[in-house]
Amino acid sequence: MRAIKLLALLVAATVAAGMGWGPLASAMTSQPFPHEKHAGLFGCDACHGGVTQPDVSPYPQPTFCAACHDGNLQPTIDWTPAEPRPQSNLRFEHGRHIEAAGNECADCHGVAGELPVAGQCRDCHSRSEALYDASVWHGSDFRNRHSAEAAAAPETCAGCHVRGDCLECHQPNPATGSPGYHPANFLSEHPTAAYTRELSCSDCHNVRSFCASCHLQAGLTAIGGIGSRYHDAKQNFIAGHGQAARQSLESCVACHAENDCLRCHSALSGRVNPHGPGFDADRLRDKNPSMCSVCHGSSIPGGG
Amino acid sequence: MKSAKLLATLAVGIVVTWAVPVSAQGYRARLDARYQGISYRGYSIDSVLAADVRLTGDGSFITADGYAAYCPAGVEYCTFYRPGPDLRGHPVVATVDANAWGFGVSGLRLNTKVRFGTDLSKANIWPGADPEVQLLEGYLEYTKRSLVAQAGRTHVATRFGWTGFDGLKAEVMPLGRKLRVLGYGGWGLARGVALPVTSSALNPLDEYQPRDRQLIVGAGLGLSLSRVFGQAIWQREIDPESENLVSDRVAFDLDLTPASNITVSGGAEFDVASGLWGTADASATYIAPRGMGRLTVGARRYRPRFDLWTIWGAFSPVPFNAGFGSLSVSPIGGLELRTSGEIYEFDDTETSTRLQRVESDGWRWKLGAAYNGLRAWRFEAGHWVDEGTGSRSVGYEGLVTFTPTEALSVTGHAERLQRPLEFRFNEADVRSYALRFDYRTVGGVRLNAEVRRYDEVRQRSDAARLSWDQWRLNAGLSFDFGTTPRGGGLHPAILRIPEGRGVR
């Protein structure tokens, strides 16, 4: 009951803050050009008329400014047009949004000339294609292919998107269960995807808090070794588990604790060597001897 | 009680921050709240005297009441699994994401993201509600021309994934933003979660945990030209108590656009600590004119990585190498057909045994279609097969979305998943059906609700087969608001000058 009251208080406070005390002051001025000072003199298209035409700079030439800032009428200024923005996969056309859709410049840029954020686009593009199928801006099937592009060049995304846009789907927290990133009913599908890392789970999820906590609740946690008729679809799983573990170790540790393995794989007990291909003992001992001492105690081989 | 105080402070803070004009001059905020009705049911381990089990024809053991038992030689007790209790929970999670600016310094803003979660049931079985209050982000940001600096709880999103920390981050973009120089450092958070590694919430299995948070430092260099994007990143984490490394990695990305409809991208990681190349990928994409289709081919290599304070790196996990491709075509307006596939093979584990054969390669294939040629309807169908190591699955699904108005959409989803698991004693056949509503009001409030039914048949040969059938409920509220106008908002001076509106 207390939790409900607290949550209600939080919701009410936030809604009240948004609806009751909304427009307090002007928007942020993040650009060096003082748009507000010039807004009463001429329209946006006096300087930025080129935005609707391809191959025309969206910025005015300095000579245009010098018509007033000539040292007599107004102080001279040192201003150069901004560089064109680098190409991206964004398919935005100013002409379509102004001429066809009837938008005003300030609808997106405010009075201060700020760059819009993706959330403003969604104010209109809010139907089923809106966020999760962003074909309006990025072409068809962007939902399926955006991961590679985002991984390769997150800065390109950050040109328009804020982290909250990504977190609508990619929330590194088990509490939300929001749809969008994973397909519907991913709960049932996730063991298959996880075994061979169709997706890189640990980029967004913490194996301990996200995987092991749920598995613990579901009774899928082994406390004390392996093989207790859980993995025994194949006989002698204990004999073959080494290959399975080296291939999908991240899946193993989603249920098993270190002590499960240390019962056998430790120089202090069991003495079954777990080291395999690519293991560089000297290098790892130099980087973090604490890891070695878990199994080897104070007698780390080669440690001098 | 502590969390209640924190929440009350948060709520009061929100009101005070936005009710008093002397504070921020502008803000955007978003509230997400979600309720779920969920159920868990798994297994509970039990034991029985070895003298009370009997040997079956295939050489395995079974208890008197029909449970398959595990009886190592010479042990007095055998262990077995019986169906666990049916646990039900009602978690509620609310997240407030707020940006405020106008503190008297142009380019300065405050960003906070706070999450509150609790389980309304007594069972308290939802792991996402621990701890109840989490600060996901909370930093001051200063932006000026080619500089972005942040101080507080922030993160970097790089090829290494999502890395959070409490500290400083600065990015300088000289040469007209063609060059990017990034530096950051502070006290690190655990992987994939906004909690320190010392948090008890990250230790459900009661394992070893570091006593101190790791220090993190990183640097990056990026180049962004019209047809070339490249960046390199280096990141090191250090245990401050022992001064041992937790991780030490470098990575690079390269993205080329040789033609307007062709992109080539790739990148790789190198683990400096272990001296091994990590995850890498390369792909090329061709986009047909007029949205007629898209073709992607590529290759990737995946190697898991573990913090060096765990023992897992010493177990020599091996990478797999994969080739993949995807194709989508739109033969007629509104119709899209797509297929994708991947084949992969693990490196040699040097563990093979005649006693058991474990698969070392696999493949997956997907086929799908979507049609949105009708005004208010969208149809999707999919089929996939996954034949791999450790698990296999075959699935079918269908999805229909009806959007009668701008504000409302209704989605129906049905799926069948057959999921034999190689390393499990049981197999499963899951059918699920769902109905979802999404509603958006004019004030920026979004509501959604989903009800899903699971029918699962666990094909297990002993008495431990259980029913996991259940209903799941999910309801959410999103509210986006702030001082920045959603539409209109032209400066009065422009409205007073007819020619100022220009020619549209």
Image (cartoon, grey):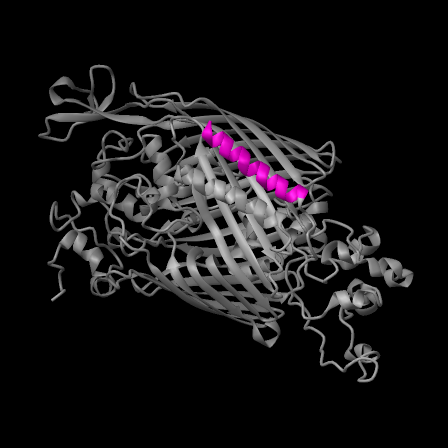
Q: Nearer the viewer, residue B449 or A184?
A: B449
What is the total number of numbered labels drawn onto the structure image? 0
Residue B200 picture location, percent across and down:
32, 43
Residue projecting furthest to the left: B74
Residue A144 shows up from this direction? no
Residue B331 picture location, percent across and down:
70, 44
The part of the chain drawn in magenta is A1-20
Magenta stretch: helix, strand or loop mostly:
helix
- Give the left or right position of residue B216, taking residue B385 as reference: left
Residue B489 picture location, percent across and down:
77, 53
Q: Quadrant of residue B58?
A: top left
Q: Nearer the viewer, residue A42 or A297?
A: A42
Above or below, A134 against B280 in this view is: above
The residue drawn where x is 66% and y is 46% is A21
Residue B267 shows up from this direction? yes
Residue projecting furthest to the top: B65
Assign the N terminus of chain B to one quadrant of the image.
top left
Residue projecting furthest to the right: B498
Q: Is residue A118 magenta?
A: no
Q: Is residue A10 magenta?
A: yes
Q: Quadrant of residue A160?
A: bottom right
Above or below, A228 against A97 in this view is: above
Assign the C terminus of chain B to one quadrant of the image.
bottom right
- Give the left or right position of residue B215, taking residue B393 as reference: left
Residue projecting furthest to the bottom: A71
Above or below, A95 against B340 in this view is: below
Residue B295 picture location, percent across and down:
59, 53
Q: Nearer the viewer, residue B105 or B494?
A: B105
Q: Nearer the viewer, residue A190 or B238?
A: B238
